[in-house]
Amino acid sequence: MKTVINQRIVLAKRPVGEPKHSDFRIEQVELNELKQGEILLKTIYLSLDPYMRGRMSDAPSYAAPVEIGEVMVGGTVSQVMASKNPKFKEGEWVLSGNGWQGYAISDGTACQSLGMQPEHPSWALGILGCLALLLIWGCWTLVSLKPVKL
């Protein structure tokens, strides 16, 4: 595998009010060689969702905050650029959560295959992103909606 330089956006400090450019930092890091069982993913699509603002804060929440200096979280659709994992082939598309970065190395456990040539790969992130999934979950779980005959 040739050397891959990964450009990533990390949380530089906790935003006060609306996030600003100065709350983030762009870093370039060289990725390690793949180990057995790993895949190299290139981010093609990134889902930017409202929940990410809460993850920038260290206030108590349903999800852990992004640590200062860590890559910002986010759902991604990526393409496998190199594979040492028998479950994934080079060129395959996957749904994953690699966050705000150009490349990621993964063991594949958090990746869902979208196949070799998905017709609309960005749709895997959801038409309305995480917000739509939360709405659907809330309707079925919290409100207990049930099908009815009209």
Image (tube, rainbow, N blue to C red):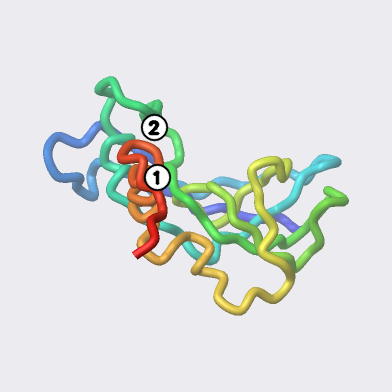
Give the residue type at disc 2. Val
Mark 1, secondary structure of its residue: helix
Label 1 neighbour load within 10 Å: few <14, some 14-19, many 20+: few
Horizontal side, residue 111 vs residue 48: left or right: right
In the picture, the quarter occupied by the C terminus is bottom left
Q: Is residue 23 visible?
A: yes
Mark 2, secondary structure of its residue: loop
Q: Is residue 1 visible?
A: no
Location of residue 31 with respect to 64 vertically, above or below: below
Mark on residue 140?
A: 1
Give the residue type at disc 1. Trp
Residue that appears at 31% across and 40% down? 143
Residue that appears at 36% across and 55% down? 132
> Label 2 near label 1: C-beta < 8 Å?
no
Asked whether 75 or 82 is in front, the reply is 75
Residue that appears at 23% across and 50% down? 21
Asked whether 43 or 129 is in front, the reply is 129
Q: Earlier in the sequence, mark 1 or mark 2?
A: 2
Asked whether 35 or 80 is in front, the reply is 80
Q: CA distance from mark 1 to mark 2?
A: 29 Å
Mark on residue 66?
A: 2
